[in-house]
Image (spheres, rainbow, N blue to C red):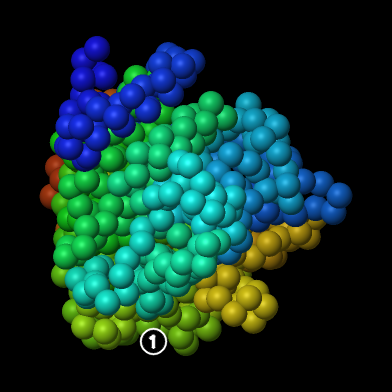
Amino acid sequence: MEDIERIKKLLHRIYGEKAGNQALKKILPLIENFPKKKSEKDPFFSQEDVVLITYGDSLQKAGEPPIATLHDFAKTHLKGAISTIHFLPFFPFSSDDGFSVMDFHAINTELGSWEDVTAIGEDFRLMFDYVVNHFSSKSQWFENYLCSEAGFEQFAIETDPSTDLSKVTRPRSLPLLSEYKKHDGTPVHLWTTFSADQIDFNFKSLDVLEKMIDVLLFYVKQGATILRLDAIAYLWKEIGTNCIHLSQTHDMVKLYRSILDIVAPNVMILTETNVPHAENISYFGDGRDEAQMVYNFTLPPLLFYSFAKEDASVLSQWAKGLNLKSETTTFFNFTASHDGVGVRPLEGILPPEEINGLIDIVKAHEGQVSYKRNPDGSDSPYELNITYVDAILADKNANQAEKFLASQAIQYALPGVPATYIHSLLGSHNWLEGVQQTGRARTINREKLQAEELVKALNDPNSFRAAVFFPYLNLIKIRKKQPAFHPNAAFEIIDVDPKVFAIKRYSKDQVIYALTNISSQQISVSLLAERKPKRMTDLLTGEKVSSESFQLKPYQFVWLNPEVS
């Protein structure tokens, strides 16, 4: 009863007492009829957790469902390294490579079936996208709205185009409102935050609330252990506000958390909010009532900047603040995803001229830049569209693999759960042909690979893919064995040299000094100030190192474990 009372209070805060009581009547049967699951994992995280981010059709093979192809590759090559597979939207869609969902309950038949997904769930834990902000204009739900069918009359947000919406925070430079006609001929202007094909849900409608909670619970039934709340920051709209991070949005996340705490306490919420760090971590709530994980969005652009400058000073200063709300929350650390490298998280950290310097590098490396619309009508950079491999590297030679791997070693040493995009693990370069085909900048990082050609490249010891893939897997497997790399293990940032990122991770059982030379120069390092035994072992190579003084080659990274006297 205490859990239900918490849900009732949240609904009253969001909708008011009368509508809140109506909302409870709608969703309570969904909760009560859900088959309860015992917690399988307490606490939530361990150093064993490593996530692979992928589309359902990132790997393809003639005559085989792509999800089955991915499963075969993962079983053969990734078992023992990857613990969780994050499927980007694999539903029927009309645009945006899956994020304009036509049917939230179905698998795109071109990718496979729910049976194929369930089969992967027998070998790996599963993470799904919960596309909660919008739905496709080609969906049956939108058709029902246009027809004013019962239960769908208020599904979209109708707004007078003369309304002053200048305060609304925009993640795109496209128009905020899009015009449609209902089937009775009535013209309507609808809220479309991301594109005219992506109709924002009207969460003021209790019918929307009911259907989307049903979707949430359906994904849990299908085996999801992590749910990524896509674009959650924009969920609630109030004219006259900036319509981002509103209190109702935070309460909605708390509502989802409260429901899952009842029916599936082992299922975690991950919020996707590509915004400055302080706004991002607000989705931890009080440490126990909102998301268990938030994307560490500042890491990708700041790490890129540090390698470009060959200076870890700003990165080190920022990392000192990566403190967690509680032992049941942690960061979702990544450097690349299906999207570009967001630059908004750099606001307040780097001046505009330094961000412009990153833009120049991206363009020089054949990448592109996407922009967002500001309240004053101007446009500003939103994300850098480039593979992380090509962002970090100065050229495409195989001997540059160590430089890219150095960036990944930093990601894997930070507090949090590490996640690697499949094209980073496979050493993929910019897919320029794909951009030409679609005309979309984000396609540069979304190539579909033929599985047989991929395996052939991995079997070639002289290929760049092999030079990245096998050392990367080795790094992951070694990390998973170290209790000091537990997502919530303690940490200290150590200042040893501006060109070296150094972090001390420690638990009651272990201490690790993870040092990465982010420069093209050899650096002499000493850890004597740490008052540690002179003899240390590099966990990555087994080599012995003296804490008194040792050399780090260009882009070399070490994980040093002090020897006990």
Q: Assign the N terminus to one quadrant of the image.
A: top left
Residue at the far right in the pictured view: 63
Query: In terms of image quadrants, where is residue 353?
Result: bottom left
In this rendering, does residue 546 appear at all?
no
* Residue to which mark 1 is pinned: 360
Task: Identify whether 113 is placed above or below 406.
Answer: above
Q: Is residue 176 left or right of residue 120?
A: left
Q: Is residue 258 left or right of residue 201?
A: left
Residue at the far front in the pictured view: 184
Task: Identify whether 316 is placed above or below 415.
Answer: below
Q: Of 126 and 439, which appears nearest the observer?
A: 439
Say which residue appears at 45% left-offset and 70% top-offset.
187
Q: Of 464 and 27, which appears nearest the observer?
A: 27
In this rendering, does residue 190 appear at all?
yes
Say which residue appears at 80% left-offset and 53% top-offset.
61
Task: Identify whether 44 is placed above or below 272.
Answer: above
Count the marks.
Answer: 1
Callout 1: SS: helix
Q: Assign the C terminus to one quadrant of the image.
A: top left
Q: Position of residue 105 (x, y in %)?
A: 58, 39
Say which residue appears at 40% left-offset and 39% top-offset.
207
Q: Position of residue 550 (x, y in %)?
A: 31, 57
Query: In terms of image quadrants, where is residue 190?
Result: bottom left
Say which residue appears at 43% left-offset and 80% top-offset.
369
Q: Mark 1: few, some, or many residues within 10 Å (few <14, many ≥20)?
A: some
Q: Position of residue 396 (x, y in %)?
A: 58, 76
Name the kind of residue labelled 1 in the image: Asp
Task: Identify whether 410 is placed above or below 396.
Answer: above
Q: Position of residue 211 (x, y in %)?
A: 45, 37
